Amino acid sequence: MNTAPEDIILRPLVTEKSNMMQEQNNQVVFRVAKHANKIAIRQAVEKLFNVKVVDVKTIRNPKRWRRVGRNQGRRPAWKKAIVRLREGDRIEFFSGV
């Protein structure tokens, strides 16, 4: 699989739960490409952020039907990855806040 790390790691997921995971367990949550496997996610995070990854967990979220008035549509399926970093390594998304 020869894809660029920027194509695998789409964006970080910043929520209260992900902030708590980062503080307590040194884990970071990313939205990733649906086709990415754990090995590719590990390599992409290590290359993009210059850190050492200890563990990767992935979760697939299914497509969901949504309705607004009479209109009905579908939200696409997506995949997220929970990446645990080595002790001492950190990824800061917002600095100086």
Image: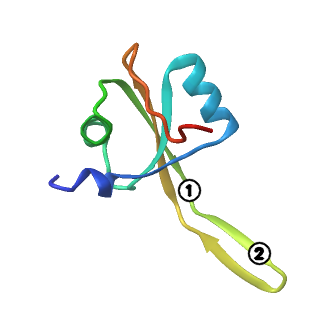
Q: Quadrant of residue 87?
A: top left
Looking at the image, which is closer to me, 14 or 65?
Answer: 14
Instruction: Give the amino acid type for the residue marked by disc 1 in the picture.
Output: Pro
Name the residue furthest bottom.
Answer: 70
Instruction: Give the amino acid type for the residue marked by disc 2 in the picture.
Output: Arg
Looking at the image, which is closer to me, 23 or 96?
Answer: 96
Residue 40: assigned label = none
Is 92 placed above or below 66 here?
above
Looking at marks 2 and 1 on the same chain, the residue that comes earlier in the sequence is marked by: 1
Residue occupying the point 60% across, 34% down: 18
Q: Position of residue 25 (x, y in %)?
A: 53, 18
Name the residue furthest front.
Answer: 96
Residue placed under numbered mark 1 in the picture: 62
For residue 68, side relative to residue 54 (left or right): right
Residue occupying the point 54% across, 66% down: 76
For residue 45, side relative to residue 74 (left or right): left
Local packing at callout 1 (Cα closer than 10 Å; few below 14, some 14-19, many 20+) is: few
What kind of element bears circle 1?
Answer: loop
Name the residue furthest left.
Answer: 2
Name the residue furthest top.
Answer: 87
Residue occupying the point 59% across, 22% down: 23
For residue 52, side relative to residue 87 (left or right): left
Is 40 placed above or below 70 here?
above
What kind of element bears circle 2?
Answer: strand
Quarter of the rendering occupied by the C terminus: top right
Residue 67: assigned label = 2
